[in-house]
Image (cartoon, helix red, strand yellow):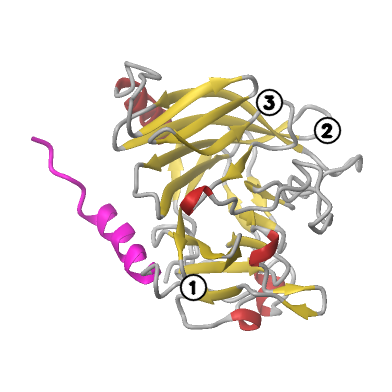
Amino acid sequence: MKTEPILASTGIAALLGAFLLAGCAHGQAGHSSGVRISQEHGKLRVEINGKLFTEYCYKDVPRPYFYPLLGPDELAMTRRWPLESTTDEEHDHRHHRSLWYAHSSVNGLDFWTEGTNANICKIVHEKFLAIQSGRESGTIQSTDRWMARDGTVVCTDLRTLRIYNRPDDQRLFDFDVTLQAPPDKPVIFGDDKDGTMATRIAETMRLKHGDKPGDGHIVLSSGARDEQTWGKRADWCDYYGPVEGKIVGIAIFDHPDNPRHPTWWHVRDYGLFAANPFGIHYFENKPKGTGDFTIPAGQSVTFRYRFYLHKGDEQQARVAEQYKEYIYEETHPPRLP
């Protein structure tokens, strides 16, 4: 088990960006099949074999997010509100925008919630380094600035999103994010439960609806289920339930090279579903500050996650086997010809 952060110099991020750009000389080349990524006003549209999968919304928003997120049989896997006006969903936690990455304590500032409080800040899209369609997969690489209300850049990130061409009964994509501290001061991701790699599942998939049981279920790789999963550590977590009468699920995989792997799961019975390696004080009832994570000035740290959208429960979808395949791919890269 890893307990120390994995840090890298700024040069690694730069080399990664240069490598991807070199391989993306054809930009947004179209494909009759495969993953197609097209630029629209303020968002990128991602289609798989001609069917909408998601849109990456990045302009004039509190933080970039994915919406909608369509899984097997083009079923909507995340809550529609607040991105659409609805009457059949709970209108709590306006900042739960489908699928996103953020944290509630970065040098004491809140990048998780929304509002007018001076402590609440924004993650601002800076630029795209790569937008690449492809028959087997598509790639989006971008940089973002985590900005205080006075315009100060608290830290930056480099995120690489890979969307794979898979059969219609599943969707698969990777979300890798490199967090970069400024050259002159460290960045502390504070010990708080509200973060970081997160999604808000569809309302019908929830474990509970108020004080009434729902039709959804939560399961961890450790075997913990439902009410026993919050704040626990595991390689992966799967949240499944009915959407339009069909059982579907979202699994999030925590990469074993991530700092503090296996991560803690901030997964709620009302539908919030997040991997959070920082909130140890809350999850394990330890002294406040136990989970503080410092990135030294001028250095960076990378977190890697995979999302697996599937039919059926975790057994029918072979979630554990899919996780093993994820790890195998990383340790056995394809040989160059």
Which mark lies nearer to you, 3 or 2?
3
At x 49% / y 62%, what residue is drawn?
Answer: 251
- Tell me: 89 left or right of 130: right
Give the mark, 3 or 2, whose residue is nearer the N terminus: 3
| Res. 59 mark | 3
Q: Is residue 336 magenta?
A: yes
- 64, 144: nearer the viewer: 64
Compute the Cα span from label 3 to label 2. Answer: 17 Å
Q: Is residue 295 magenta?
A: no
Residue for badge 1: 234
Residue for badge 2: 149
Name the amino acid, label 3. Lys
Q: Is mark 2 on a helix, strand or loop?
A: loop
- Identify the image quadrant of residue 298: top right
Quadrant (top left/top right/bottom left/bottom right) for the N terminus: bottom left
Name the amino acid, label 2. Arg
Q: Residues within 10 Å of mark 3 (few under 14, many from 20)?
A: some
Q: Residues within 10 Å of mark 1 (few under 14, many from 20)?
A: many
| Residue sitting farthest toward the front | 245
Which mark lies nearer to you, 2 or 1?
1
Looking at the picture, does residue 195 appear above or below residue 314?
A: above
Q: Bounds of the magenta span? A: 319-337
Which mark lies nearer to you, 1 or 3?
3
Residue 292 can be seen in this image: yes
- All told, the count of numbered labels is 3
At x 66% / y 78%, what residue is drawn?
Answer: 284
Q: Is mark 1 on a helix, strand or loop?
A: loop
